[in-house]
Amino acid sequence: MMKLVEVFPRSRWISELKAREKKAAIREMLQLLVTLGDMDADDSKKAERAVQKREGQGSTAIGKGLALPHAKGCPFIDRVLGVFARTREGLPFDAVDGGLVHVVFLVISPEDKESQHVEIMRRIARLHLDEKTLRFLAKSETLDSLLEIFKEVDDSFA
């Protein structure tokens, strides 16, 4: 099974989002995938439409400052891609608890990787159970410590 450390390597982290609203944040995260060569600009637009379609079914901001925008079944990619981002200021994301979002995990997956997509979403959702960990993810000055949290979650599923 895929691990958080595989889907969200440090190269795919945004330590402080520039965006101040949901659509711009998703676009900024997808742009990082373009910059890294994980997808081209056209595929980024397709991914954005797929994520926005999913957001239209109900916000993926699940409360406690955490959002999980995602899209599965994307035929234009060949592996599960993720971006981890945070914002100290917080963004309006239509969260179920009405609060601002400080931690965002974007997940895009191809048609043949649905089980991996679900597994990654389960691992991220595990973080939702611990408000202290979410606060740490949002505010930690040392990014290496964030990697340790991802490893701990991965190990809890081993």
Image (tube, helix red, strand yellow):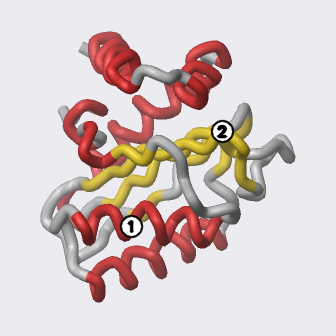
The answer to which image quadrant residue 8 occupies is top left
In the image, farthest residue toward the right: 98
For marks 1 and 2, give the CA distance: 20 Å
Tag 1 residue: 30
**Do the CB atoms of the residues marked 1 and 2 lie less than 8 Å apart?**
no
- Give the secondary structure at mark 1: helix
Instruction: Give the x, y percent position of residue 82.
Output: 33, 51
Pointer 2: what residue?
Answer: 88
The answer to whether residue 10 is seen in the rendering is yes
Residue found at x 52% / y 56%: 69
Q: Which quadrant holds the N terminus?
A: top left
Secondary element under disc 2, as helix, strand or loop, is strand
The kind of residue tagged 2 is Arg
Res. 157 visible in picture:
no
Give percent across and percent down for residue 111.
Answer: 24, 67
**97 relative to 123 in the view: left or right:** right
Q: Amino acid at mark 1?
A: Leu
Which of marks 2 and 1 precedes in the sequence?
1
Q: In front: 40, or 120? A: 40
Q: Residue at x 69, y 65 (%)?
A: 21
Residue 42 sits above or below residue 124 on the image: below
Q: Position of residue 148 (x, y in %)?
A: 33, 15
Q: Residue at x 38, y 75 (%)?
A: 47
Closest to the observer: 73 or 22? Answer: 22
**Circle 2: is it few (<14), some (14-19), or many (20+) Cα within 10 Å?**
some
**Image point (59%, 30%), residue name:** 138
Place residue 40 in its image quadrant: bottom left
> Mark 1, mark 2: which one is toward the viewer?
2
